[in-house]
Image (cartoon, helix red, strand yellow):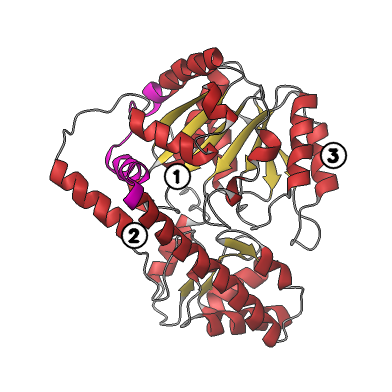
Amino acid sequence: MALPLRSLTPAPPDPILGLTETFRADTRPEKVNLSVGVYVDDTGVTPVLPSVLEAERRLLEKAGSKGYLPIDGRPGYKKAVRDLVFGPDHEIVESGRSATAQTPGGTGALRVAADFLLQTGSSKTIWLSEPTWPNHPQLFTLAGFALRTYPYLDESGRSVDVGRMLSALRSAVPGDVVLLHGSCHNPSGVDPDTETWAAIAEIVIERELMPVVDFAYQGFGFGLREDADWLAGLARPGLEFLICSSFSKNFALYNERVGALTVVAADSTRASSALSHLKIAIRANYSNPPAHGGDIVETILTDPALRAQWEVDLAGMRTRILGNRASLVKALVAAGIPGNWDPIGRQRGMFALLGLSADQVARLRDEFAVYVVGKGRINVAGLTPANIDHVVAAVKAVIEG
């Protein structure tokens, strides 16, 4: 009996992780990988944060059991994540109308969210921003959703096209799911302002939509609370939505796969009911979450001294990214490359769009060993003093042609 393959032709590689495999095989010494969203320091290394090292030391000394975690994760971790997302004094926390489950990374949270929504009778249509993270369409399609898109960027690629975005969302059918980026939009780095978030919330209420907020970069933009500014628009009493958190970036725990899914319900009774359905989705998916990364996050967030150290560590990464944005804009302008580059310096998070064509992206890779994805999405954190001049010279060459 043969495997039920539709074709013997190999599946296409992942647009981001597959490109990294090509990068690794590239023998050119000047190669630069700006495709994958991983923080690196000025030497090109992804560091282990001092707060993480100390938390691991403490965990090793405790040497606890390797038994299964609860289906929805450790209670201490869940509480720490909830307080980090909302702040401990937020109405959602004080009312008890949220339920959090520990997941394997933000991707795991998104998949559990998809399964939870479908198994509880959700609409099978989800609206994604155009552009969005390349794994969003694949993940939700395989889960069973039909995809629709809403325009996100204006023609410049440097600002949200508020009118077109809101108009598209108004055409959604009641019950449809809408995926929103909580902050540090991937791939553009362009986020809605406070007024736009309030307008989005009005449409969510008016059209009875179900928001899923992908919140993968809290603290990587302007600050922990600053990057949760979307809550002011969306977190209204009684409004229900889902939040998918990732701690790959802000704790630099990429290979530990640490995340969470939080359901915000109208009241505590509905939150408790939602958690029971989350457990079914988790049990059928991966049974229960991995422990080590979550234990690191819990240890840091629940110890005042470690929490303070982590915030210093996080601020260091954030400051470097903001500095890289300023350096990139300065270098692009100094090189006389056509375009309005100033907005890149005001954007938030790891990513920026250079607005390149597919041919220009291919030339960057093939001629200059500079790896980017999509329409020239770059990981700003991947720029270093040793590679920025080469990157800018390559961008100038492909734009000027």
Q: Residues within 10 Å of mark 3 (few under 14, many from 20)?
A: few
Which of these two is toward me, 304 or 191?
304
Residue 214: x and y in percent read 57, 41
Residue 211 drawn above or below residue 29: above
Q: Which mark is residue 109?
A: none
SS at mark 2 in the image? loop
What amino acid is labelled 2 in the image? Leu
Q: Which one is earlier in the sequence, the residue at label 3 or at label 1?
A: 1
Q: Nearer the viewer, mark 2 or mark 1?
A: 2
Residue 319 visible, this angle:
yes
Label disc, if present, on residue 49 of the rendered structure: 2
Left or right of 175? Residue 251 is: left
Which label lies toward us, 3 or 1? 3
SS type, badge 1: loop
Q: What amino acid is found at the position of numbered circle 1 in the picture?
A: Leu
The residue that mark 3 highlights is: 167
Q: For the N terminus, which image quadrant?
A: top left
Crowding at dot 1, Cα within 10 Å, few <14 / some 14-19 / many 20+, comes out as few
Magenta run includes residue 298: yes
Residue at figure coordinates x 46%, y 77% from the top left: 31
Boundaries of the magenta span: 282-305
Residue 245 to residue 274: above or below: below
Q: Is residue 237 above or below residue 328?
A: above
Counting labels gives: 3
Residue furthest to the bottom in view is: 335
43 vs 159: above or below: below
Residue linked to disc 1: 8
